[in-house]
């Protein structure tokens, strides 16, 4: 049953109430276009659940909420799970300096739809799971260009993949839905964050030393010049990265889209090529399993030895 104020959505074994389904979260971009609503986001979450959930299950989340839409205040990052969330939404209480945080964990379609009801536009996930929070099973390199030059991002991704190939590490490619690309390495989860971060730092520094005119590991923006920043800062306890297939809080609702490496050669590709405005295209990409055949998870131990020899 649907009213102008409430919509009931069947999600798995539960029925989730969507309040203010017509609330515009993404304003219209031009004449003749309608805004994208909370109902649009909820339907996207429901349809993409088979692809979103494997990337979210068991992981603490940071939720980017925009109750009045992306163009209005308030908007905020939410770590602690509010008391009013249903008891069937999974929580994970994890330590932080001076206390704990009760993170939301999204393990089912009903939770995905409920998060849309809460105007959680973008889902940022930990690189580790709630049951082993100190041991990441992902390594993330964020290719952050100094401007909107996507060709620089494309070239950096190719160079990073070449180095990862030298180290015999599998690499997964994803548009961020913002300006750049993420390159992710799946790990076996045996090493702690400090070791993984040190490896990522050493790798990025080696790559930047090979291409000093175009790549940098300099954290301060005023020292980067026109070079692309190899950002490894997400590789730390309690840090997050945008989840694959998540919508971004940007104009038009761009999606963080996993890609096969050969799509990097598509001249029409940019960081926002897929969006909430064309869910069928996103679903078609997801159904093509773009990350299939990229190799099993790896330990960094042998790769670290190879990296040391290269350096």
Image: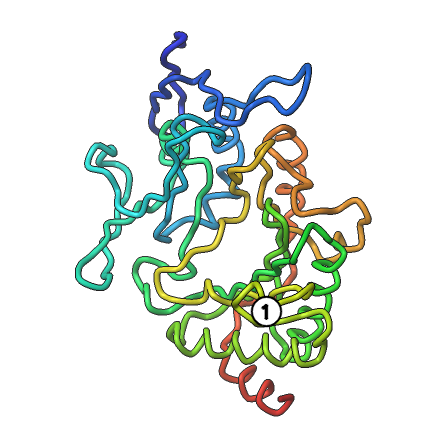
58 sits to left or right of 182:
left
* Relative depth, front residue between 45 and 71: 71
92 sits to left or right of 210:
left
Q: Quadrant of the N terminus?
A: top left
Which residue is pictured at 64% across the width and 63% down the height?
Answer: 294
Which residue is pictured at 35% across the width and 60% down the height?
Answer: 238
Instruction: Locate residue 272, reporting x and y percent.
Output: 65, 42
Q: Quadrant of the C terminus?
A: bottom right
Q: Which residue is mark 1?
A: 223
Question: SS at mark 1?
Answer: helix
State the count of labels.
1
Q: Is residue 109 above or below residue 269?
A: above
Instruction: Locate residue 147, reporting x and y percent.
Output: 67, 53
* Relative depth, front residue between 235 and 58: 235
Tell me, yes or no, if residue 76 can be seen here.
Answer: yes
* Relative depth, front residue between 103 and 208: 208
Q: Is residue 56 above or below residue 168?
A: above
201 sits to left or right of 109:
right
Q: Callout 1: 10 Å neighbours few (<14), some, many (20+)?
A: few
Instruction: Locate residue 208, reporting x and y percent.
Output: 65, 76
Instruction: Locate residue 159, reporting x and y percent.
Output: 72, 70
Tell me, yes or no, if residue 12 can be seen here.
Answer: no
Which residue is pictured at 65% across the width and 58% down the height?
Answer: 145
Based on the displayed image, in which of its 4 quarters is residue 173 positioned? bottom right
Q: Is residue 25 above or below residue 62?
A: above
Based on the displayed image, in which of its 4 quarters is residue 202 positioned? bottom right
Which residue is pictured at 23% across the width and 38% down the height?
Answer: 82
205 sits to left or right of 300:
right
């Amino acid at each position: 049953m649907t009213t102008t104020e409430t919509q009931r959505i069947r999600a798995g074994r539960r029925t989730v109430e969507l309040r203010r389904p017509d609330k515009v979260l993404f304003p219209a971009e031009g004449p003749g276009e309608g805004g994208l609503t909370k109902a649009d986001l909820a339907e996207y979450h429901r349809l993409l659940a088979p692809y979103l959930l494997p990337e979210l299950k068991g992981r603490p989340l940071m939720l980017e909420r925009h109750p009045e839409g992306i163009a209005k205040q308030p908007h905020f990052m939410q770590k602690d799970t509010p008391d009013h969330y249903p008891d069937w939404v999974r929580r994970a209480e994890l330590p932080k300096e001076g206390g704990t945080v009760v993170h939301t964990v999204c393990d089912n379609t009903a939770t995905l739809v409920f998060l849309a009801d809460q105007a959680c536009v973008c889902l940022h996930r930990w690189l580790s799971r709630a049951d082993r929070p100190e041991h990441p099973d992902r390594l993330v390199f964020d290719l952050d260009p100094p401007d909107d030059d996507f060709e620089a991002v494309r070239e950096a991704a190719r160079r990073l993949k070449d180095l990862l190939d030298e180290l015999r590490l599998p690499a997964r490619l994803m548009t961020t839905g913002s300006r750049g690309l993420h390159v992710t390495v799946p790990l076996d989860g045996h090493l702690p964050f400090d070791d993984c971060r040190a490896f990522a730092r050493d790798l990025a520094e080696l790559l930047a030393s090979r291409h000093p005119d175009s790549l940098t590991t300099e954290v301060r923006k005023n020292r980067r010049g026109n070079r692309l920043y190899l950002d490894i800062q997400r590789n730390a306890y309690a840090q997050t990265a945008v989840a694959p297939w998540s919508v971004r809080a940007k104009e038009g609702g761009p999606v963080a889209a996993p890609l096969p490496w050969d799509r990097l050669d598509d001249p029409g590709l940019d960081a926002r090529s897929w969006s909430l405005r064309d869910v069928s295209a996103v679903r078609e990409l997801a159904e093509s399993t773009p990350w299939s055949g990229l190799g099993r998870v790896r330990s960094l131990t042998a790769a670290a030895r190879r990296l040391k020899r290269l350096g």
